[in-house]
Amino acid sequence: MAVSKCCQSCLRIFILITNAIFLIIGDVLIGVGIYFCLFDDQAAVKEIKQTLDEEFLVLRVTLISVGSIMVVAAFCACAGMVLKSRCTLILYCVLLCLIIIFCSAVGVVTSVMPSINQSAQRELESGVKRSYGSVSLVTTGVDSIQSEMRCCGWWTSTQAQFENSCTWFNGTTWYKANPVDKSDSNSPKCPSSCCADGKANCKSPYAESCTKKIFKKYLVAVPLAAVAAVILCLCHLLCAVVLLVKGSHSEREIFAI
């Protein structure tokens, strides 16, 4: 009996600690989403809004929605433990089931639907093309990515394989501010971040598209994150179900330490 109570106490502490962390993370996400809504005239937020355009609304809604779900689920878990409420704990189990279904769907969709991958790449290319050279936040970020990942341009097609990768920047604000002077061999034809030596107008810029490289490297993280979230939710669901089953004979037994 003592061992059983000890196990129940450990499960209770595990649920409390992890959900307290989720509660904080959810609050942060909601705070960022609200900040984007209320202070969209701030310089940094303006740049993000200008870059993402219509996607900025989706970003704000997503942050607030995900944060709200995390807060509600974490609150139910903590309240179920502290207030010794079986109904709240049952609600927590229901929310976990919904989260598991959602994460599973996200993982499957991102894994088996390449069209979503292509669409996301085109959106990224469009945003960078529109903002490079005019939005300092984007320009700095793009230059940093190109230097660190040793890539150049943000092609989504295979066109970069047949021509100089720096031609992608033709038509950008940066290109208009740095026109090519054919009589001047030092005239910048591509950003210095595309060159291994860090100097503009290099003869052999990085050939691989940054868009392709980023998605190749990081898109796998989406289904992996979904799998991790499902596993974590299953662990919490198992703990909650065990506590509910153990407390079926005595409503307060699961909260005894």
Image (cartoon, rainbow, N blue to C red):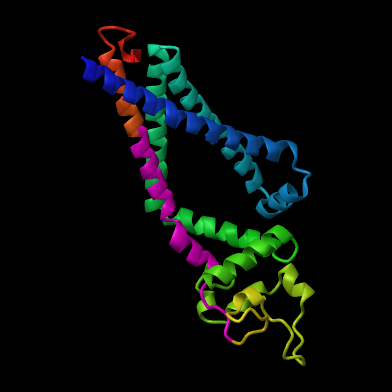
Say whether residue 176 is left or right of residue 219: right
Q: Is residue 244 visible?
A: yes
Q: Looking at the image, which residue is at 41% across and 55% down?
A: 220
Say whether residue 111 is left or right of residue 147: left
Q: Viewer-proximal residue, 6 or 141?
A: 6
Q: Quadrant of residue 63?
A: top right
The magenta stretch spans which residues? 204-233
Q: Is residue 130 visible?
A: no
Q: Viewer-proximal residue, 38 or 122?
A: 38
Quarter in which the C terminus is drawn = top left
Q: Residue furthest top?
A: 250
Q: Viewer-proximal residue, 115 or 27?
A: 27
Q: Residue 202 in the image: x percent, y percent?
A: 63, 85
Q: Viewer-proximal residue, 72 or 211?
A: 72
Q: Does residue 230 belong to the magenta stretch?
A: yes
- Give the answer, above or below, for where 61 lies relative to 175: above
Say whether residue 53 is left or right of residue 95: right
